[in-house]
Amino acid sequence: MTGAGEGDGGDASGGRGDRLSEAVAALRTVADDGVDFDGLVVRRGSDGLRFAVPGAEHRGLDAADFDARAREHAAHVREWYVWHQEMPQEPAQWDFLRWVERADEYHPPDRRGRLTRGGGVAREWGQLSVQVRLADPGRERGRDAGGSSRGADGDRRRRRYTLRHVDDADTPAGQLEGYTDPHDARRLRKEDDRGRYRPLSTAPTLQRGWAFVDLEPAELVRAVEGFYPATVANWHREREGELDVTHWEETVARQTGIYGVVQTWNRGEGHEHVDWVAEACCDDSQCLKRREWEYDADTPLSVDSGDGVFPCREPCSLVVAAARRWTRLEAEESRTYEFELTPSEKAQVEEIVDAVADGRAGEVREADFADGANRYRARFLRAKRFEDGDLCGVPTDRDEEDGSGGDTDDSAGEEAGGDGAADDGCGESGR
């Protein structure tokens, strides 16, 4: 026999019949099957029970000795019990909750200490800050913590989660608008800080000012999935090597109805047009998912796939809807126009395009006349160079084309659509 007892993040073990005793008895019950979890090893051998944790090993134990050794290493026993008896057992949820508290990085005594001290452990999931700590929910809620949240040994602490916008991570939850129902996340994800509809739930425009407090483990997962549907399931599938990716060509081939026109964009001309689509829609500045789909299984795209925590398994409905429009626009033949602009005016046009593409046009200060996207500078350019709505008075003459590029198509449902796509355009099926 070697080793000594361990700390337990401040927990006190009690007598028979307490919560720790339940955990010890349950652990002894499964000794025949064997346990190997977070450094805890339990086996029943021909000479009796074996109990081992890092730095300590005990063999040939009878039931009483086993219980005594288990109590000496209460943190390991408690964590085994929590993760096998109390936490959600659905694999994706279970893995996600362990990821949140970095369970793979710290052994139970250290982990419980980290969860107990200060604000606990926090991680980022897109624009969400997920915080977990061991807390006494009854005391913090100011009401009786009876029932399942109160153990006979006085260990009332349970994992409790707080969810905030990542930019509000340092703001006390009491200073934010508080929520406890995970379903409210669906409503919050629909609008940005300016009250504008967000067609893509994983766009980096999540509104601030809210906090989900004192969530149970399963409630946390539901809230996270309310903000970012299917991200936990797809993240888990990727970790398990089971993420089924649907590439561009396959996605385009299955489009029907008004979206079937997208199929005509692939004309054996390479995949540069899909690079443009991915650069426009799937960049980290536009979507927090990490793109895993390519042109096809053998043809990767040339643009960066992003650094998101959770993967994107297929072109989403917003991408398909945008591609439908671009398919029509790209059917136009190029033509030569002649404009007369000063060098600064040409540069200003380019700055305006950049500002709109980067979503910062509304942020340009009214007195910042050095910025080409300044509203007054843009108005000056229009006053000087536009005539009857045409740049430099040069008509577009779009109607003289063969009609393939006319802007007269039915745009109903164009914001987000495509084959069986979700209405918020983020390819959210957890397949």
Image: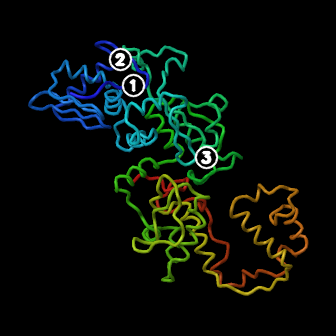
Residue 52 at x, y percent in the picture: 25, 32
Mark 2 nearby-residue class (10 Å; few <14, some 14–19, many ≥20): some
- Residue 404 lies, with reference to residue 215, above or below; the image says below
Residue 149 at x, y percent in the picture: 42, 20
Q: Which residue is mark 3?
A: 190
Residue 46 at x, y percent in the picture: 8, 31
| Alpha carbon separation for disc pair 1 and 3 | 43 Å
Q: Nearer the viewer, mark 3 or mark 2?
A: 2
Picture residue at 64% right of the left edge, 39% below the top: 168
Q: Secondary structure at mark 3?
A: loop
Figure label count:
3
407 relative position to 365: left or right? left
| Alpha carbon separation for disc pair 3 and 2 | 47 Å
Q: Which residue is mark 2?
A: 13
Quadrant of the image containing the C terminus:
bottom left
Picture residue at 52% right of the left edge, 15% below the top: 143
Residue 254 at x, y percent in the picture: 43, 68
Q: Which residue is mark 1?
A: 8
Mark 3 nearby-residue class (10 Å; few <14, some 14–19, many ≥20): some
Q: Secondary structure at mark 2?
A: loop
385 relative position to 138: left or right? right
Of mark 2 and mark 1, the one earlier in the sequence is 1
Residue type beneath disc 2: Ser
